[in-house]
Every structure is written in structure tokens, then in C-alpha cells.
Amino acid sequence: MTPVNHFPKLTIHSQKLKENTQLIMDTCGQLDIQVSGVVKGTNGYPGVLESMIGAGMTHFASSRLDQLSRLKSMNPDLHTLALRIPMLSELEDLVEVADCSLNSEQETLAHLNQVCQAKGITHEVILMCDLGDLREGYFSNERLLEAAHFVEEECPHLYLKGIGTNLGCFGSVRPDKVNLQELVENARLIEESLRRPLDWVSGGASSSLPLVLNKDMPEGINHLRIGNSLFLRDMEEDYDFNFQGLHGDIFTLEGEIIEVRNKPTYPIGDKVVDAFGDEAVYQNKGIRRRAILAMGRQDLGDMTRLLPLDPGISLEGGSSDHTIVDVTDSDRAYQVGDIISFNILYEHVMFATGSPYIHKEII
Ligand SMILES: *Cc1c(COP(=O)(O)O)cnc(C)c1O
């Protein structure tokens, strides 16, 4: 027999996701910015894709080809963008499922052109500029311009759709008027040199939304790749913005209690390291009532950052399969078998939507 998972359970609220999708598309649309909806953070979960398509989203992006493939099988007319600069070993599949890809290596572009030639198709490319975040992208403007000419003149099976940048990922650099203006200027240089306009100047991810809201986005940025803010509001505090009207509770996670007991809070005995090899720090808060939930780091990543809906609950820690919460201050007298609900962060969404151990439901 196949055991059935009832808990942990992830509930996805489809109507709220649709409203977020429409609000972000409308807000960006007012500045003539096209949005590609980034679905990698939800593992391209089918119900999530259906909700976004239902909301009218026509452009999608992911770093994972199987998610782009799923989108194409749902509707071949959807535009798909491959976000991670490609591996040579995936080019054959990439051009079948992605209409467009981000790129930063001439060798890869040359191979991409050959693969498309053999298949008799054309593939769109966006050249990435590194404006200081130090992940992918051309660092020098001369190399970027060279690459643009290479695609335009020597790769008849590639179409140079535009240029783009990624910020706030490795180097924690904030997208701002200065670095994105530089991207626009790079685009104008390429356009003058090629004597034709580029379709897209792709100005980043959710971390670029504050510029849209504040009407600070440099003119000329006309494409964004938005994932996180479609689903969550957990970036707004760090990036100092308030996207009014967005739902922050699209996902609810529920875990089931398998033990409730009063216990000391400071471990007893000679201490080594915890289950993950870390030297954990323990605070002695005396005897407390705590519950163990049947879910852990394998299901959720860092479960100590979960956000309990019951304000009387705090996260104490856990291991691969266990999450320990302190319920002493709650108004509820929790028992074995009771369910505790949480709001979750991007990391938890990523783990939970990909985990075969989590029961998922879209309502
Ligand atoms: C993940 C990713 C995005 C989307 O980032 P969010 O913060 O989820 O909006 C955009 N561009 C690239 C290249 C990415 O890898």
C-alpha cells in the first residue's frame, strides 16, 4: 500500500494568487513594463501555474526546464524564458521548451545557434550585464557590445531580444536609478551600433519593484522577471517598500503535534553539535510547555523562521523531521493530534512545493 500524507499540509489560495498576479501586471503595465512571472520558487506547481494563467499572465520564466516544459504543455502560446544561463548539456532541450534565454557566454551562444540551425528554429536571447552584483553577466561594455554583434551578425538562428541584469542575489546590491540607468544606456549603445531597437531591457526581479512603486524606474526599462512578490510579502521589510493591496497569505502551512510535554529548555549533559553539525546556542528559560510537530528541515529548510498564526507560539528549533515549538504562552491547550498553522517565507515555499512529503491543496 502507499501511505497517505495528511500532514504537513500546504494550502495555496488560488483567488489571492490571481489577484496578486493581476495587481503586479497592472502596476507594471502602467509604466509599459512587461512582466514574466517567475515560477521556480513554487517548483512550477501545476495549480499555481493554472491560477497565474487564469489571471491573464502570458509570459513565464524559470531556471528549471521541466517547469517551462509543463507550461508549454498547458498552452504552447505562453512565452517562456529560461532564467539561469544555460549549461551546454541542456541546450537541445532548452530550445524546445524556452522561447528565450538569458546568456553571458559567447561559446554557449555559438552552440545555441548550431542547435537551432539543426532544428530549423529561431531562439531569442537576452545578454546579461553585471552591474556590480557579481553573479552572471558581461562586466565590460566592450565585451557586451561584441557579443551583441556576434549574435546579430553571426548567429542567424538567434534573435537578440534585448539585454538584462540581475541584482540583489549574490552581492546583495539594491537595484536603483543609477545602476538601472546604466543598463538603459548600455541598451542605447547597442541599439545605435546595430541600428535597430531592442525589444526588452530587462531590469531585474522583485527587488526592482520599489522603483516601479516610487515611479523611479529609469525610462527604457520595459521588462521585469517577478517571482517572490507574486507569492509573498517577505521582501518588503528588507527592501523598504509597501506594495499596497498585495496578499501576503497565499500559502498556509499546517503541522500536526506528535508530543506535548513540560520540559526544561536547557539541554542536560555534555554538549557536542546539533543534527546539522552546528554548535547551537540554548537559552535557559526554565520549564516550558512545548510541542513537537511532525515536519522538519527536510520538508521546509530553516523551519525556525516559520511564522505561527497563533501569537502565543514561538519556534524553538528542530531537526530533519521535527519542529519544536513553545506553546506555554498560548491561550489554547494544545493536545497530541492538534494542528498548528503558519505563514511561510520564500525558502519554505521552495522546499514545501518541491517536497513529496507535504500534502498540497489548492483552494
Ligand atoms: C529567480 C530569478 C528572478 C526572480 O526573482 P524574484 O526575487 O523571485 O522576483 C529573476 N531573474 C533571475 C535571473 C532569477 O534567477
Image (spheres, rainbow, N blue to C red):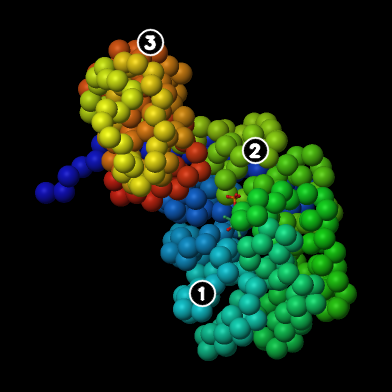
Q: Between residue 72 and residue 206, name the one nearer to us.
A: 206
Mark 1: which amino acid? Met
Residue assigned mark 1: 87
Give the alpha-carbon distance from disc 1 to disc 2, as whole Å. Answer: 32 Å
Secondary structure state at the residue bearing disc 3: loop
Q: What is the x, y in percent for residue 334? A: 29, 17
Give the residue pinned by disc 3.
331
Residue picked out by circle 2: 238
Residue drawn at the location 24% of the way across and 19% of the way down: 261
Distance (Cα) linking label 3 and label 2: 32 Å
Q: Is residue 362 above or below residue 96?
A: above
Q: Residues within 10 Å of mark 2 (few under 14, many from 20)?
A: few
Q: In the structure shown, which secondary structural element does the residue marked by tag 2 occupy? A: helix
Callout 1: 10 Å neighbours few (<14), some, many (20+)? few
- Outermost residue, left direction? 1
Q: Nearer the viewer, mark 1 or mark 2?
A: 2
On the rendered structure, is 11 left or right of 104?
Answer: left
User: Which circle's residue, 1 or 2, is located before the other in the chain?
Assistant: 1
Number of labelled discs? Answer: 3
Residue at the location (40% across, 13% down)?
329
Q: Is residue 353 visible?
A: no
The earlier-in-sequence mark between 3 and 1 is: 1
Frontmost residue, 289 versus 204: 289
Are dots 1 and 2 in contact, CB under 8 Å?
Answer: no
Asked whether residue 51 appears in the rendered view, the answer is yes
Which amino acid is tagged 3?
Asp
- Disc 3 from disc 1: Cα separation: 53 Å
Q: Which mark is residue 110?
A: none
Q: Please determine whether, in this image, residue 80 is positioned above or below residue 34.
A: below
The residue furthest top is 331
